[in-house]
Image: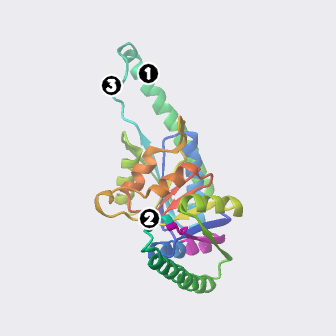
Amino acid sequence: MYRHVIVPTDGSDVGTRAVEEGLELARSIGAKLTIVTVLHHFHPLDYSPDSIVEALDPHQAEIDHHVKADDLLERKVRASGVACSHIRVRHDHLCEAVRMAAAAQDCDLIVMPAHVRNGWLSGSIDAETVRLLSNSNVPVLVLH
Amino acid sequence: MFRHIIVPTDGSQVGERAVEQGLELARANGAKLTILTVLQPLIIYSVAHELVVDLGERQHEETERHKRDDRRLEEMVRASGVDCTHIEAEDMHLSEAVHQTALAQGCDLIVMPAHERYGLLGKAVDSETVKLLSKSHLPVLVLR
């Protein structure tokens, strides 16, 4: 079966749930798990000159949030007893980041979080996931 | 983890490989497996009128081929020892057939065969898979 499962998270609730499912799956099939926390780059040009100082603060807040979410994850991983490694990368596209990490770590299954869209896109699947499905060389488990 | 897995096949080699993987996953999880063979209905207007005379013979050949495929599948299932049911459905769209059957049978994971498309834009994920991902509220494992 699968030997090495990889699951990306962006620190959101949806990402954390995906990690939990990834852990459960890895345990049930006796596989290793790699968690990739993907942080966005900070783009200074997205901000106007007078708001960039304030913008830096929320960015720091985002990092703090990630550190806290990571602590929680690591406790869950320890409790589950699954062999697990955790990497952090900076990338603007989750799908690209996880695809590269999967290739580098020699993973044979990607677990993708279910980023549910609201509004008029509610019926459609996340574009990042479709891109990953087209580009990936390994099977992808898309959660819901 | 998963209790009831469903895997569609259209009798092709790709479909058969998906069934193999579904069986393996079901065994690892101690889950039930439902194999869904989806046949395309014969649409009379899509056949050139010169060919209509051969239709009976063609239909016969198709049925024979399917019987052979089914026998092979049943052997695979018996060898694996997984609790398995086999359903046949007729639908123009694989995604719709799988979605409806998964709902009716109470499945909790769909395993999709790796039907890849190659073309001008390079490798792309099968549109039936994308449709299924948008429709279904179940996790979908997309194979390669």
Residue displayed at 48% across by 75% down: A17
The CA distance from mark 2 to mark 3 is: 36 Å
Secondary structure, mark 3, is helix
Circle 1 packing at 10 Å, graded few (<14), some (14-19), many (20+), is: few
The answer as to whether the residues below labels 2 and 3 share one chain is: yes
Chain letter for mark 2: B
- Which kind of residue does numbered mark 3 sit on? Ile
What residue is disc 2 on?
B108
Magenta residues?
Answer: A22-44
Mark 3 or mark 2, which is nearer the start of the sequence?
A: 3
Q: Is residue B97 above or below residue A18?
A: above
Secondary structure, mark 2, is loop
Secondary structure, mark 1, is helix
Horizontal and vertical percent position of residue B41: 36, 34
Marks 3 and 1: which is nearer the front?
A: 3
Task: Indicate which disc residue B44 carries.
Answer: 3
- Which kind of residue does numbered mark 1 sit on? Glu
The answer as to whether the residues below labels 3 and 1 share one chain is: yes
Question: Where is residue B123, by image quadrant?
Answer: top right
